[in-house]
Image (cartoon, helix red, strand yellow):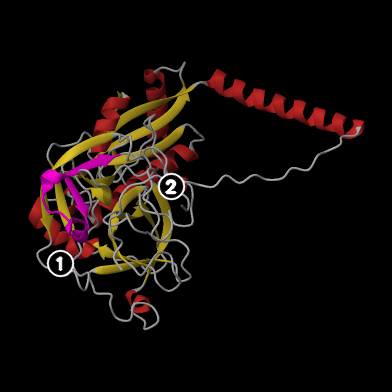
Amino acid sequence: MMYGPVEFSEADYPQVEYQRKQQFWDPIRLALYTVAIVAIIGIATGIVTHFVVEDDKSFYYLASFKVTNIKYKENYGMRTSREFMERSHQIERMMSRIFRRSGDGRFIKSHVIKLRPDENGVNILIVLMFRYPSTDSAERIKKKIERILYQSLKTKQLPLTINKPSFTLTSIDSKKMQNLLNSRCGIRMTSSYMPLPASSSTERIVQGMETAMEGEWPWQASLQLKGAGHQCGASLISNTWLLTAAHCFRKNKDPSQWIVTFGTTITPPAVQRNLGKIIIHENYHRETNDNDIALAQLATQVEFSNTVQRVCLPDSSIKLPPKTSVFVTGFGSTVDDGPTQNRLRQARVETISTAVCNRKDVYDGLITSGMLCAGFMDGKVDACKGDSGGPLVYDNHDIWYLVGIVSWGQSCALPKKPGVYTRVTQYRDWIASKTGI
């Protein structure tokens, strides 16, 4: 069965009243509780005072330096390539180690922005993020950071050889930092321009009543037919292109009849756009669900922010082993044939091998090379109606990649009937041929 589009309606949750047992307090117990409450209030006041006095503020720096013991590779120019990912992670890990070893607990994160060719190696452009008391000046913090970095260069215990004279450090504001990070895909930011780590996303969608936080899945879009409401999910892959499922456009292929919204709620939306173009895969087969993939182009581009951001497309060579932890998000129903939700929900699921998914007691040979199974063999957590076309994403060192598109499944969250997704790596050439991405 296809996770078909459904009309929008708000879900009603029953209010459960729990019976309370009346308590009778004796004087000793009352005195002990009073002491405990006073102690808790004292500790809480101390914590609040600590943070108010500290009043930490975010400081951002753009660092540039030359690494001389590696050679530039052509794929470093492609931010979604395996080579760029691996080298960036090595550099970011090295930065983390430098500051942690120094005992400076103020370092938050670093993000490589660019790897550029240099005649003596590779030039690195990287953003560094810190939290310091707001009474500190950016210039004083800069001197402290430089001292830590120069000290670590002297030890020569780093995996990469940094050319000291090439090192520059510039203080930047949050706007400049946000613009630099916008050049990279798959990064999630909070409203205070701090990175949102992958660990903050726990299990939620079917069998989960919790909703997504603001900025948690900024590439998630809602595809809505004018007059009929939410039909499908979609993923933002550039400032103009969305990736979704072909079956979402069965009812209507006219772009002028569709609108797209972004944000954690359908109503009100954070951002709204009209569609300018719909491209459905030429070999989409309704009967077999093969090639269930489509592109939709926005009539006007979106500005990237902490609430609207593009997800990374994976390198076509990336293969996720079975039981890899992935996330599915959507506005779909939380029970089979239930209503669409106004708030975005999420669930952690696991990849399931095609061999297991094609077993007679599972999908009996229906899974093709362009499909990917994810969920749990005992059911319970799954995508459902209205989630169609939405993202299945994988986290690689806090950078998120779109590995699947919600496509089909038998009912929702049934044992031995996991969700089936369009395998994005299989369609990288097709996406590139239509969009240049």
Q: Residue furthest front?
A: 227
Q: Using the image as rendered, state which of residue 362 and residue 98 is in the foreground.
A: 362
Q: Which residues are magenta?
A: 241-262
> Horizontally, is 336 left or right of 27 in the view?
left
| Amino acid type shown at disc 2 | Ala
For mark 1, give the secondary structure: loop
Q: Position of residue 195 (x, y in %)?
A: 38, 38
Q: Position of residue 359 (x, y in %)?
A: 36, 81
Could you tell me which residue is drawn at 41 percent across and 61 percent down? 336
Could you tell me which residue is drawn at 48 percent across and 63 percent down? 380
Rendered image: mark on residue 284: 1
How many numbered discs, if any? Answer: 2
Tell me if residue 175 comes above or below residue 207 in the rendering: above
Q: Residue furthest bottom?
A: 360
Tell me if residue 168 comes above or below residue 282 in the rendering: above
Between the C-alphas of marks 1 and 2, the distance is 33 Å
> Horizontally, is 139 left or right of 250 in the view?
right
Q: Using the image as rendered, state which of residue 149 and residue 137 is in the foreground.
A: 137
Numbered disc in front, either 1 or 2? 2
**Which residue is under mark 2?**
11
Where does the N terminus fall, quadrant-wise?
Answer: bottom left
Could you tell me which residue is drawn at 36 percent across and 46 percent down? 9
Q: Position of residue 280 (x, y in %)?
A: 12, 58
Task: For label 2, count other residues whose C-alpha is less than 10 Å away and answer few (under 14), some (14-19) or many (20+).
Answer: some
Q: Position of residue 99 (x, y in %)?
A: 44, 37
Is 98 in the magenta?
no
| Amino acid type shown at disc 1 | Tyr
Q: Residue furthest right?
A: 27
Q: Using the image as rendered, state which of residue 43 and residue 37 is in the foreground.
A: 37
Which quadrant of the structure image shows residue 68? top left
